[in-house]
Amino acid sequence: MQKQQSNRRFSQGLIAGVSAAVLVVGGGTIWWAVNSITNFPKDPNTSEITLKNSPHIYWLNSTNKDGELISRPITIKKSARSSEILHSAMARLLAGPGDQNYTTTIPQGTKLLNLTVEDSEVRVNLSQEFTAGGGSASMIYRLGQILCTATSIDSNSKVWLSVEGKPLEVLGGEGVTVRQPMTRQNFEEDFAFSGCN
């Protein structure tokens, strides 16, 4: 009888010890697996980021009666080339702000027909809608939105602007002259523009 109790105690102790070992090993394995998955390096080519020098879209501040362009950064793929990044930024600009605090002077329906980046030159080709309606102030801010967005990665870029494949020389009925290539510096000089903030 005493031998049976001793065997039971030994069996219970053995079972308890094995159970504890299984829990420790199993818990450690689960911890390692979860930690490995969550800390597994992400593919650097597909992760999306917002960088300090990421492209910005420029909107008109609807609460400021004097007119002021406000920049908003966009999220990009790390692997994207400059032309892809600016193409995405320009397409988002032409789609409109989607926020009541911002507005745009770019006519609805304006399409991006082409955008190329080579060295420090950005060539933007827009549809005919870009030239529709608005006074001279609207035309200047319209050009400013395009220029600031197109130069948001490299502020020293030169921007060549075309409409339906033809270089834009004069915009609107009031005849706003467009100096080509456009740069931030000559735009500020030509139009007393407050700049791309």
Image (cartoon, grey):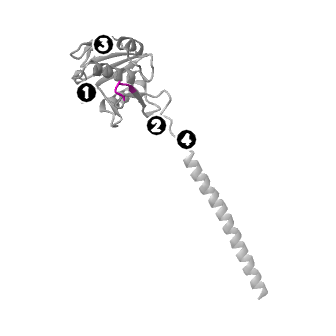
Q: Mark 1 or mark 3: which comes first in sequence?
A: 1
Secondary structure of the residue carrying tag 3 is: loop
- Quarter in which the C terminus is drawn: top left
Cα–Cα span, label 1 and label 2: 33 Å
Q: Residues within 10 Å of mark 2 (few under 14, many from 20)?
A: few
Q: Name the residue tied to disc 4.
A: 41
The residue nearer to you, when weighing 149 against 176, is: 176
Does residue 197 appear left or right of residue 15 in this picture?
left
Q: Which residues are magenta?
A: 64-69
Between the C-alphas of marks 3 and 2, the distance is: 38 Å
Answer whether residue 68 is magenta in the image: yes
Which numbered tag is attached to residue 178?
3
Relative depth, front residue between 52 and 43: 52
Q: Is residue 93 above or below residue 6?
A: above
User: Can you say which quadrant of the picture contains the N terminus?
Assistant: bottom right
Task: Tell me the amino acid under the disc marked 4.
Answer: Pro
Q: Where does label 2 land, which residue?
A: 46
First along the sequence among labels 3 and 4:
4
